[in-house]
Amino acid sequence: MALRSAIINVMAMAADKAATRLVRDFGEVEHLQVSRKGPADFVSSADKKAESILRQALSKARPEYGLLMEESGETVGSDPRHRWIVDPLDGTTNFLHGIPHFCISIALERDGEIVAGVVFDPLKDELFWAERGLGAYVNDRRLRVSGRSRLPDALFATGIPFLGIQDGPGHKKFLGQLGRVMAQCSGVRRYGSAALDLAYVAAGRYDGYWENGLNAWDVAAGILLVRESGGQVSDIAGRRYQLNSPDICAGNEALHTPLRNLIREPVA
Ligand code: 2AM
Ligand code: CA
């Protein structure tokens, strides 16, 4: 049985509290699909409500820590070494459409490094968590990236840019990447939550994942999950992943580089 530290317990309890509210609102969203305007305003308020529950729980446990949150941005804490990085609802488009695939992502940064992370999928009751140097887990089970080493066996995940996001050159760049990857591997998935995509790489479900143009709160917890389960995370150019990197590529040890070679801009 995995023994969770005090800090992971704080994060898991905050996630659980916000998730209770999110799941109740998700039930409501399913009813609102048929209305002409759809549930967009309702979802935006569910997102904000979850964020405020998380802010309250995390600030109560560690009042001196700073916060970086998707909806409300940066709150500077009295302790300059520590910062929570929070996405209250990752997979918002799924939530909005009544698709049961979304999560809460919470990371703790210390001196610029992620030291603890939690990604909670309340509908599947999967709590992915990791602490630096201590490994990654889903609920009580230790995680390990997959052992696949050949591209033809590999299943990869990605995110597809959409209207208003990386329009023009970014869309073309993604289509090039997808074209090269899909021709070499056993499948590409697009499930719409970057945090869960990284958690699934950590769990060995996907062999790798890439996406362009994400924010720190989408990936902060997920990158620690991948690293603590023996995987690698870099930007597409191969530099160690930083929270402001322009793109991300994660994978097991054997397939991280082959995937990165496929999604890099080909040399003219
Ligand atoms: P969200 O659900 O919190 O919005 C899917 O490819 C991933 O992209 C999700 O993790 C999603 O996070 C994120 N995403 C959605 N809109 C985005 C935007 N405008 N900029 C960057 N990332 C975004
Ligand atoms: Ca997100």
Image (spheres, rainbow, N blue to C red):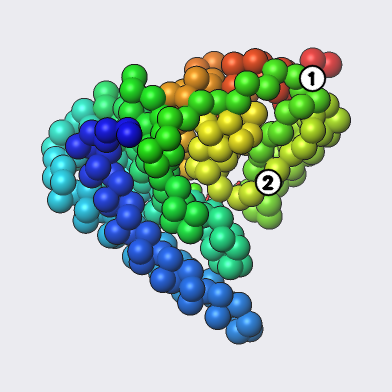
Q: Tag 2, which secondary structure?
A: loop
Q: Residue at x 48, y 77 (%)?
A: 28
Is 146 placed left or right of 86 in the picture?
A: right
Where is residue 266? Give x, y as percent: 79, 19
Question: Which quarter of the figure is the N terminus placed in?
Answer: top left
Residue matched to label 2: 190
Q: Quadrant of residue 257?
A: top right
Above or below, 238 against 9 in this view is: above
Crowd band around label 1 with a 10 angstrom C-alpha radius: few (<14), some (14–19), many (20+): few
Where is residue 265? Give x, y as percent: 75, 23
- Quick one: which residue is furthest to the front in this view? 1
| Residue in front for this viewpoint, 169 or 226 | 226
Which amino acid is tagged 1?
A: Pro
Is 185 placed left or right of 75 in the picture?
A: right
Residue matched to label 1: 266
Label 2 residue near ligand 1, CB within 8 Å: yes
Above or below, 40 against 201 in this view is: below
Where is residue 44? Give x, y as percent: 45, 67
Crowd band around label 2 with a 10 angstrom C-alpha radius: few (<14), some (14–19), many (20+): few
Question: Which quarter of the figure is the C terminus placed in?
Answer: top right
